[in-house]
Amino acid sequence: LLIREPMMTKAKTGKDATATAADAGGAGGNVFGKCVPKMIFVGGLGNRPATEFTFQSSDPICSEGQQEALNPNIITNHIKDVVNTKCDATDAGKALVADAIVKVAALKDRNQATADTWNQALGLA
């Protein structure tokens, strides 16, 4: 199982891939198709001050057409729309994203733990 990680230096392979995505995987492919819908929480995105942290997807396909946001739910909903329409994701991948949205919305937090919860729910932590 190979999961590419845009904007990262190393792809997860084999035993490094988490059980969530691996268990949902189809015939040796990425359940999210050509996307890796990982969420980041970073200061200084979009010409914001380095001390202002916002959410965004690290995947160029998932982040296309959506600026960074202070509200993680804006990003999770955009990622869901992209995964469902542009990534060629499997039904299992789409279901993982839908479940992750519920988990993030329940947190009501706006910090790194929110991005971590999203990534863990998708098996991308």
Image (cartoon, rainbow, N blue to C red):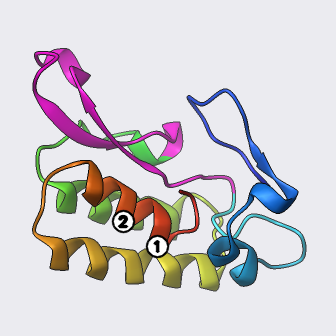
Q: Is residue 41 magenta?
A: yes
The amino acid pointed to by label 2 is Thr
Residues at badges 1 and 2 in contact (C-beta under 8 Å)?
yes
Instruction: Tell me the SS state at disc 2.
Output: helix
Q: Residue at x 46, y 39 (%)?
A: 58
Q: Is residue 106 magenta?
A: no
Please, is residue 58 above or below residue 62 in the view?
above
* Residue 1 visible in the current orientation: no
Residue 91, how many percent across, how many down?
Answer: 61, 84
> Of 19 and 2, which appears nearest the observer?
19
Residue 115, how many percent across, how many down?
Answer: 33, 54
Tally of numbered tags: 2
Specify few, some or many for label 2: CA neighbours under 10 Å numbering under 14, 14-19, or 20 or more.
some
Residue labelled with disc 2:
117
Please, is residue 112 above or below residue 78 in the view?
above
Residue 95, how many percent across, how many down?
Answer: 51, 85
* Residue 20 visible in the current orientation: yes
Q: Residue at x 11, y 44 (%)?
A: 70
Residue 87, how many percent across, how many down?
Answer: 60, 59
Q: Residue at x 12, y 53 (%)?
A: 71
The answer to whether residue 105 is left or right of residue 30 is left
The amino acid pointed to by label 1 is Ala
Q: Which mark is residue 98?
A: none
Magenta part of the chain:
34-61
Q: Quadrant of the N terminus?
A: bottom right
The answer to whether residue 1 is left or right of residue 121 is right
Please, is residue 69 above or below residue 37 in the view?
above
Residue labelled with disc 1:
121
